[in-house]
Image (cartoon, rainbow, N blue to C red):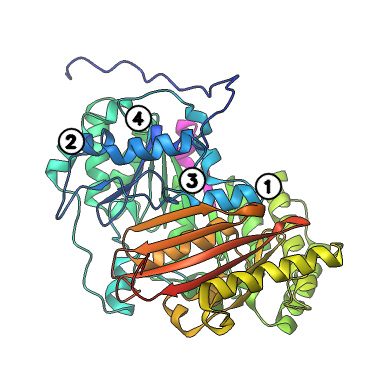
Amino acid sequence: MLGPQPEPVRRSQPAVDLVAPPACFAPGSALYLRPDGLVMTCCGGWHLLGRVSGPGRRSLREIWDGPERAELQAALAAGSYELGCFACKVEMDHAPGGGSLAREFDRYGPEERRFPAMIDFALSDRCNLQCVQCSGTFSSSIRRHREGRPPLPAAYDERFFDELDEFLPHLERAQFKGGEPFLMRESRTVWDRMLARGLAPEISITTNGTIWNDKVERYTEDLGFDVIVSVDAVDPASLEAIRVGVDAERLWANIARFRRATARTGHSLVLSFCLMSINWQQLAPFLQACDRVGADPDVIWVGGPGNFSLLTVPRADLLDVLAGMERTDRALGPLSPAARAIWDDALGRVRGQVEGSASTVPVVLGSSRSAQARFDERIASAIDDLAGGDGAAVLRLHYVDELLQDVQAPAWSAWLQPEGWRGVGLRETLTTITLAAGGSVRSEVEELEGGAHRLVLTFEGEGPAGRARSIEGRSLPHPDDAGTICLLFAELPSGPGA
């Protein structure tokens, strides 16, 4: 018999009638624990709160109560995104039609907390698959077999889990990602501690679906997981070619098991599909399969590596894709409302890309000649500021209708692989830049006139970048169209202020 049980967690309600709510509630409500032991507020932020392993290690309590989180919270309360939140700032300024990661934390409101309401657990990169679109950042198998890199040291020890015990009863939501969470000792340790204490926060888990045994079933049912299974094709040969190491028959059998387990507990099953140049033909069968098994569909547009991005294929190939999707559309039978909405969005997005790919010149249809001229002049002036007018030294990213349409990449930017970013949104681009660095990122943001921004990013890790680097950028909105923006970056020779 366990000792006294914790009181049920009181669910936070978003505040109402606030005159000036914070730009984001994440720093007052959430933590993101990375596989390397670095702690951030969220998966899209760059402001380092602390680390739970290695040099400079701090306890979870010290990190939550630390000045870094308070500093970020104060900045966002004042409407400033300069402490590592530039991606959301740009997205909300220049992509008003789309959502922002910041909005996902609105549910928690401005309540002052001694503990986070949500923790995003990405405690290891351990994974048994080598998906073609993935990298060693997220898969230990890829890290070892494809990239030949040494294993990522384990970052979460018993001392950390002892510190975590104080936080678990206060969680309203927990998210587990990978790697593959069902293979991680670290994830199982957290689940066992939750079970021992009778805790029942909302829990979502993203899994590759390859693991099913008595323990998986027990965790899924006893903790009431909302399960997200990654599936990138229905055709067995295509599925096994993309998700290298998976057995298609076993995967679908496990999906049926997850469906039964989540149905017994009244929780959700989501099937996730990475839409790429090599599997677009599988999108309609995937949506039909979701309806058939009673799962909610989710589609992720892959922006890189470049050869897998559907929206970066040559125009002639893109026309073939559109023709194929339109043929499928004419023959497509009934779909659930959720599946139909995803299909219509994908078809519309490809149509829009075909129309936009006729020219890579970032001209906004319907804008005045003078507005376009002012936009071009601002770009030229920014290039002059960044690189003395040397356009060949500047990474140029042009967004139209909130999506990256054109990339002009100098040699120095090869470590970022920017050619693979076409078709993604603003925040996804900036998040990808930080992931490429392989370590923490410091940012400086300055608002300029006309809605423009100056940005300096300093990458403190030595991951794929090969060494510590700093880059300076400008974000320039089109005068007539909030969804059109130009991002420019130049490499700083020896850091900010050099």
> Quick one: 297 or 246, which is closer to the camera?
297
Q: How many badges with numbers are in the image?
A: 4
Q: Which residue is mark 3?
A: 81
Q: Are marks 1 and 3 in contact (CB under 8 Å)?
A: no
* Residue 264 part of the magenta segment: yes
Tell me which label, 2 or 4, sits earlier in the chain.
Answer: 2
* Residue 484 part of the magenta segment: no
- The kind of secondary structure element at disc 3 is loop
Q: Which residue is mark 1?
A: 96
Residue 252 in the image: above or below residue 415: above
Q: Which mark is residue 171?
A: 4
Real-space Cα separation, disc 1 to disc 3, in angstroms: 16 Å
Residue 364 falls in image quadrant: bottom right
Crowding at mark 1 (Cα within 10 Å: few <14, some 14-19, many 20+) = few
Mark 2 or mark 1, which is nearer to you?
1
Q: In percent of the image, x 59 and y 69: which residue is there?
A: 382
Real-space Cα separation, disc 2 to disc 4, in angstroms: 14 Å
Crowding at mark 3 (Cα within 10 Å: few <14, some 14-19, many 20+) = many
Crowding at mark 4 (Cα within 10 Å: few <14, some 14-19, many 20+) = many
Q: Are marks 2 and 1 in contact (CB under 8 Å)?
A: no
Disc 2 marks a residue whose amino acid type is Glu
Q: Which residue is mark 2?
A: 163
Tell me which label, 4 or 3, sits earlier in the chain.
Answer: 3
Q: Quadrant of the C terminus?
A: bottom left
Crowding at mark 2 (Cα within 10 Å: few <14, some 14-19, many 20+) = few
> Quick one: 341 or 401, which is closer to the camera?
401
Tell me which label, 1 or 3, sits earlier in the chain.
Answer: 3
Disc 4 marks a residue whose amino acid type is Leu
> Quick one: 409 or 250, which is closer to the camera?
409
Range covered by the magenta-colored residues: 259-271
